[in-house]
Image (cartoon, grey):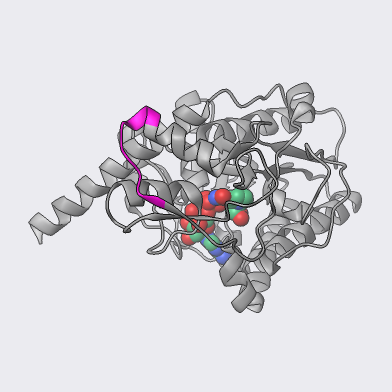
């Protein structure tokens, strides 16, 4: 079977994409993940869901020779989905060079390998953060990009420019950049999800941790925005919907008549959900009461952002189908799995 190489396959979105790809049974799936922000435990989780063990090379993409060796060992790679990157906006402000080095160094090496080994189809994880503090809603792919707010967002913007130049140079590699809005939730089985850092600063992990009693209460950053209930509005999209979009994007490139194609697509639900609406959805679907309070605004937060995804619908045949309730229910199920795993570890050791 032809092979798809996923970089960052042990991470949150990469592992969900691996699951959807393996379940389709059209491709072998391998991964390069240096495990800097994940563990091999993810491979067991993927296996528990799909019945298949994904091969992961624990290699840093910045090591060009080691990366080349993976392409040498698999001469049937037909597509690369490039997730591997550092992704904390706040951290990137403190260690910008680490972010530029990792995110751009990795991208350049993997593109180089695609050109050298004749891999024609490349999908890139981009982010709505490249739009900066945008006021024109809903956001379209050709909405004017404002100044980006962080080095992290800049690595995505520069990454897109690198791919554009690379495609223009005619190396017989086509690229699709997928600009995710806010991917949340977990696999519907509850067996795979995001392993949160010790102090998550994204809403859904903070909600599930507060409900599980792992943090004392949830802080809602700002209740005085000029929105319908005073809290920020975001476009949440289920991680499995995001995963499926990657397969649609691969198919799109594989069937494209044009070579050296470069395209960008927004991936969101197209709906704005406020922080209080998200909390309400969580309480409704799980029956859990969530301890929260309204705190001050957080620096750098935009008041509202949501996507127009009509381009992905028309050209990729993709729309997000899972609701905010599905996102919350799966995230809570995954939180139970994490708690259970931690209890087991405690009992065993
Ligand atoms: N999760 C989000 O909310 C979100 C939103 C927009 C865009 N993105 C982008 O999507 C991609 C995947 O995000 P995620 O949430 O799955 O992140 P993640 O941290 O869970 O996964 C990324 C994986 O890449 C690996 N990695 C990092 N640098 C590497 C390197 N140099 N060599 C090899 N492996 C490396 C990490 O170990 C990790 O397993 C990232 O590019 C991220 O910027 C994520």
Residue lying at 69% horizontally and 31% vertically, measured from the top left? 270
Residue lying at 77% horizontally and 62% vertically, measured from the top left? 148
Name which quarter of the figure residue 80 lies in.
Answer: top right
Q: Looking at the rendering, in which quadrant would you find the C terminus?
A: bottom left
Q: Position of residue 229 (x, y in %)?
A: 60, 40
Query: Does residue 181 appear to the left or right of 196 in the view shown?
Result: right
* Figure check: 268 above or below 194: above
Total residue callouts: 0
Q: Position of residue 173 (x, y in %)?
A: 78, 45
* Figure check: 259 above or below 230: above
State the residue in front, 129 or 252.
129
Q: In the rendered structure, which segment of residues is drawn in magenta?
A: 284-292
Q: Is residue 73 visible?
A: no
* Figure check: 210 above or below 255: below
Q: Position of residue 330 (x, y in %)?
A: 39, 33
Judged from this view, the residue extending furthest toward the front is 224
State the residue in front, 2 or 258.
258
Q: Is residue 60 visible?
A: yes
Residue lying at 36% horizontally and 35% vertically, measured from the top left? 52
Residue lying at 73% horizontally and 38% vertically, measured from the top left? 266
**The magenta stretch spans residue 137:** no
Quadrant where ligand 1 appears: bottom right
Query: Does residue 139 appear to the left or right of 275 in the view shown?
Result: right
Name which quarter of the figure residue 136 lies in.
Answer: top right
Q: Position of residue 261 (x, y in %)?
A: 85, 40
């Amino acid at each position: 079977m032809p092979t798809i190489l996923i970089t960052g396959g042990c991470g949150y979105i990469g592992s969900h994409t691996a699951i959807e790809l393996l379940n389709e049974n059209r491709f072998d799936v391998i991964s390069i993940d240096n495990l800097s922000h994940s563990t091999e435990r993810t491979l067991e989780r993927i296996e528990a869901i799909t019945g298949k063990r994904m091969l992961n090379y624990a290699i840093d993409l910045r090591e060009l020779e080691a990366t080349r060796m993976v392409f040498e060992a698999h001469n049937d790679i037909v597509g690369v989905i490039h997730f591997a990157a550092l992704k904390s906006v706040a951290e990137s402000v403190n260690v910008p060079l680490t972010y530029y080095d990792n995110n751009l160094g990795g991208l350049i090496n993997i593109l180089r390998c695609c050109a050298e080994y004749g891999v024609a189809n490349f999908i890139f994880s981009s982010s709505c953060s490249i739009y900066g503090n945008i006021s024109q809603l809903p956001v379209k792919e050709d909405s004017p990009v404002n100044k980006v707010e962080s080095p992290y967002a800049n690595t995505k913007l520069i990454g897109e420019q690198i791919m554009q130049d690379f495609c223009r140079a005619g190396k017989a590699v086509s690229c699709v950049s997928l600009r995710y809005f806010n991917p949340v939730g977990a696999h519907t089985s509850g067996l795979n999800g995001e392993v949160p850092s010790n102090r998550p600063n994204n809403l859904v992990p903070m909600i599930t941790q507060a409900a599980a009693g792992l943090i004392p209460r949830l802080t809602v950053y700002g209740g005085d925005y000029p929105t319908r209930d005073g809290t920020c509005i975001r476009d949440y999209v289920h991680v499995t919907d995001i995963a499926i979009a990657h397969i649609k994007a691969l198919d799109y490139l594989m069937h494209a008549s044009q070579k050296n194609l470069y395209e960008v697509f927004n991936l969101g639900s197209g709906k704005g959900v406020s922080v209080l609406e998200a909390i309400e959805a969580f309480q409704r679907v799980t029956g859990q009461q969530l301890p929260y309070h309204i705190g001050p605004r957080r620096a750098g937060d935009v008041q509202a952002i949501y996507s127009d995804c009509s381009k992905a619908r028309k050209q990729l045949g993709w729309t997000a189908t899972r609701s905010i309730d599905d996102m919350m229910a799966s995230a809570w199920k995954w939180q139970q799995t994490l708690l259970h795993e931690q209890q087991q570890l405690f009992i065993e050791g």
